[in-house]
């Protein structure tokens, strides 16, 4: 499963800092996720809410 945060950030023209501010997720955690770390579900929920996307939009999987 791949986390699509980089792609969403690119499409919305957002930086790591801006995502951190919008979502309440720390700058280092956002950066780690962009570099391939697997986030916890509560972090995915914060990201989805702050970025105004569905939680399933945050990952690539054939099992959506």
Image: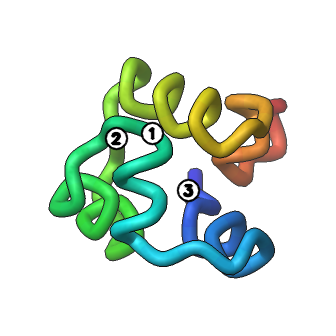
Residue displayed at 23% across by 60% down: 27
Instruction: Please tell me in which quadrant of the rendered image residue 12 appears.
Output: bottom right
Q: Is residue 36 left or right of residue 51?
A: left
Q: Residue 29: horizontal and vertical position, in percent?
A: 22, 53
User: First in sequence: mark 3 or mark 2?
Assistant: 3
Against 1, residue 47 (above or below) is: above
Instruction: Please tell me in which quadrant of the rendered image residue 7 appears.
Output: bottom right
Of residue 47 and residue 17, the one placed in the foreground of this image is 17
Residue displayed at 69% across by 30% down: 55
Determine which residue is flagged by label 3: 3
Distance CA(mark 3)–CA(mark 2):
9 Å
Determine which residue is flagged by label 1: 23
Against 34, residue 42 (above or below) is: above
Badge 2 density bin: few <14, some 14–19, many ≥20, Cα 10 Å: some
Determine which residue is flagged by label 2: 39
SS label for mark 3: strand
SS label for mark 2: loop
Quadrant the C terminus occupies: top right
């Amino acid at each position: 499963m791949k986390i699509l945060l980089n792609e969403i950030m690119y499409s919305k023209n957002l930086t790591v800092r801006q995502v951190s501010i919008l979502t309440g997720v720390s700058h280092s955690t956002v950066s780690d996720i962009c570099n391939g770390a697997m986030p916890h579900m509560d972090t995915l929920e914060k990201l989805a809410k702050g970025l105004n996307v569905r939680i399933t939009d945050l990952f690539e999987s054939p099992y959506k």
